[in-house]
Image (cartoon, rainbow, N blue to C red):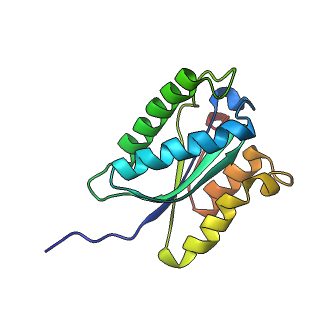
Amino acid sequence: MSTYTQIIYQIVFSTKDRSPIMIKDGRKRLNTYIWSLLENKKCHPFMINGVEDHIHIATSVHPTVALSNLIKDIKVSSSDFIKEEEIFPGFDNWQVGYGAFTYSIKEKENLINYVINQEEHHKKESFRDEYIRLLEEHGIAFDEKYLF
């Protein structure tokens, strides 16, 4: 029997100390880089986008890939890329930790649109409020003192 999965993840993490240093021009290059990294790991990216202080990745993950290892690889590799290419002056690193939320295939288009519209979305909701909302919507218990 073969392995079949259909799990879509929304992965969210921010810059260290949520520093608003990811300028718009550099984000496209970063997103393209992460997209290629995901494809090289046999994942299927659907959308990558973010704002000045955090990023959202909508992707499926190949069943042979551990999510925590994938996110570690994304963070380490993209951090090196950002520093080598100097696309975000002042970039120090990514935050410790991440959020990963699962979605059904029926929710894929809504998730993609949500990620596409990050700039518009964050005119109304802060990253802090968004992240807490995502945790609550997905039934994830958390202690706020460890979030930020």
- What is the x, y in percent for residue 123? 86, 52
Q: Is residue 60 shown left or right of residue 85?
A: left
Task: Kindly tell me whether residue 135 is visible in this rendering.
Answer: yes
Query: Does 30 sit left or right of 117 as displayed?
Result: left
Instruction: State whether residue 13 appears in this view.
Output: no
**Quarter of the figure that contains the N terminus:** bottom left
Figure check: 126 above or below 112: above
Residue farthest along the bottom direction in this orientation = 106
Q: Determine the residue located farthest toward the right in the rendered image.
A: 124
Q: Residue at x 35, y 48 (%)?
A: 40
Residue at the limit of the structure toward the left, as seen here:
1
Between residue 98 and residue 24, name the one nearer to us: 24
Residue ID at (42%, 66%): 7
Left or right of 55? Residue 81 is left
Judge by depth and name the residue closer to the eye, 52 or 88.
Answer: 88
Looking at the rendering, which quadrant does residue 55 occupy? top right
> Which x, y percent locates residue 10?
54, 57
Q: At 70% from the left edge and 34% from the top edge, which residue is drawn?
A: 22
In the image, residue 84 sits, relative to residue 97, either above or below, namely: above
User: As displayed, is residue 94 above or below residue 127?
Assistant: above
Image point (58%, 39%), residue name: 30
**Depicted 46 relative to depicted 108: above or below:** above
